[in-house]
Amino acid sequence: MRYFDHNATTPIAPEVLEVLSRVQAEVFGNPSSIHTPGQEARRELEAARAAVARMLGCATKEVVFTSGATEADNLAVLGVPEGHVITTAVEHPAVLEPAKRRMAAVVRVDGQGRVDPDEIRKALRQDTVLISVMHANNETGVLQPVEEIAAVAREAGVLLHSDGVQAAGRIPVDVQALGVDLYSISGHKFHAPKGVGALYVRDGVKIAARQVGGRHERERRAGTENVPAIAAMGAAAALPRAETAPLRGRLEELALERIPDVVIHGKGVPRVPNTTNMAFLGIEAEALVIALDLAGFAVSTGAACSSGATRPSHVLEAMGVPPAVAKASIRISLGRGNTLEDVEALVCALEKAVARLRKLSPAYA
């Protein structure tokens, strides 16, 4: 199987698996214990914290380990003081759902999926406490103007959170340069295991723990830390980034050249280099995903967390994409291990599958 669904999850890198196995087998102590086994676990924990801090360009004390990005997003949105929240229509449900509990203002995006910082400014109220805007979209790869939004937030004296799940490990991330106060990441998006993530909390920012019962993680997230998974995420944070931009460029070039009536969402604006979201007009995306799976290629219709949904993607809907086009859209996300040969083989499979499905489709003339 040739794997093109790295935005859903990534395979654990061999060097990361080695760390995970070693720590799981040998480092069994509780990192809060003061005896030797406990301090061995503490050393693994803090070494991983330092590696994640280097990845994000922050201080080690600003890294809070979580069970994943969903918890990190929830902690960011619900952990800030009570008040009004501003977010966007293309956020992941891990942000949109907790934001509903804050009666958030949801700002629209343009046809390319980008939010205008002026729209954020217009949504500000006197009781606004947080702006939450993702760094890179999980379905289209579109990058938001986080630095410009950070300027708006600073001017208003409001905290800024960014869901960086699809950016970390794919592009350089410097939370200081971005100007964010809170930033969420998930280990399994950059070759660490599932079930581990982190939240950057800028020094001086106060957040209330959503999970209580202990003083772990500087009293920001109670519970004994998952040391093996955290150590593995530290190893993954040090991996070199995959060079996917040339592969994504060739993929889009060949698809547009060899397959008629293809739309690439967000193509005109900055995107993370591994992601493309393409509509093949006149067919159903689910049928195309199944056809490609049978041909030995794994792609998706969008967010894995929304699989099984019958309505079109909320991201494409927010971009103003017509329902028929949204339902014809698939996401292809590249990563470590993908080659030019894989890309060319995928386009051949796409060409055959699209042609066959269009012959069967009354919607395609």
Image: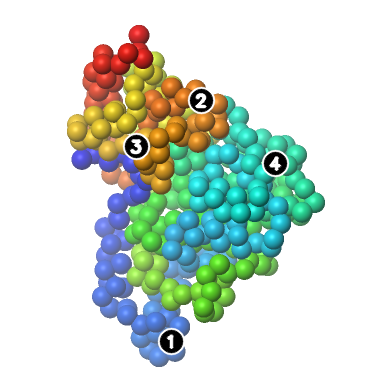
Instruction: Name the residue: 48% across, 56% down.
Output: 70
Instruction: Name the residue: 69% across, 63% down.
Output: 81
Q: Amino acid at mark 2?
A: Val
Mark 3 crowdedness (10 Å alpha carbons): few <14, some 14-19, many ≥20: many
In-image side of 190 versus 54 (left or right) = left
Q: Amino acid at mark 4?
A: Ile
Q: Which residue is mark 2?
A: 321
Q: Earlier in the sequence, mark 4 or mark 1?
A: 1
- Regarding residue 168, the answer to whether it shows in the image is yes
Q: Pick the residue in front: 65 or 283.
A: 283
Relative to 324, is 90 above or below?
below
Q: Which residue is mark 3?
A: 300
Mark 2 and mark 4: span between their CA atoms? 22 Å
In-image side of 47 versus 254 (left or right) = right
Tell me residue 146's x, y (percent). Answer: 62, 44
Q: Pick the residue in front: 209 or 226.
A: 209
Instruction: Name the residue: 77% across, 48% down.
Output: 125
Mark 2 and mark 3: span between their CA atoms? 18 Å
Q: Which residue is mark 4?
A: 120
Q: Pointers 1 and 3 in contact (CB under 8 A)?
A: no
Q: Pointers 2 and 4 in contact (CB under 8 A)?
A: no
Mark 3 and mark 4: span between their CA atoms? 31 Å
Residue 287, quarter of the rendered image: top left
Q: Earlier in the sequence, mark 1 or mark 2?
A: 1
| SS category of the residue bearing label 2 | loop
Q: Amino acid at mark 3?
A: Ser
Query: Residue 33: which numbered mark, if any?
Result: 1
Mark 4 crowdedness (10 Å alpha carbons): few <14, some 14-19, many ≥20: many
- Regarding residue 251, the answer to whether it shows in the image is no
Q: Nearer the viewer, mark 2 or mark 4?
A: 2
Q: Earlier in the sequence, mark 1 or mark 3?
A: 1
| SS category of the residue bearing label 3 | loop
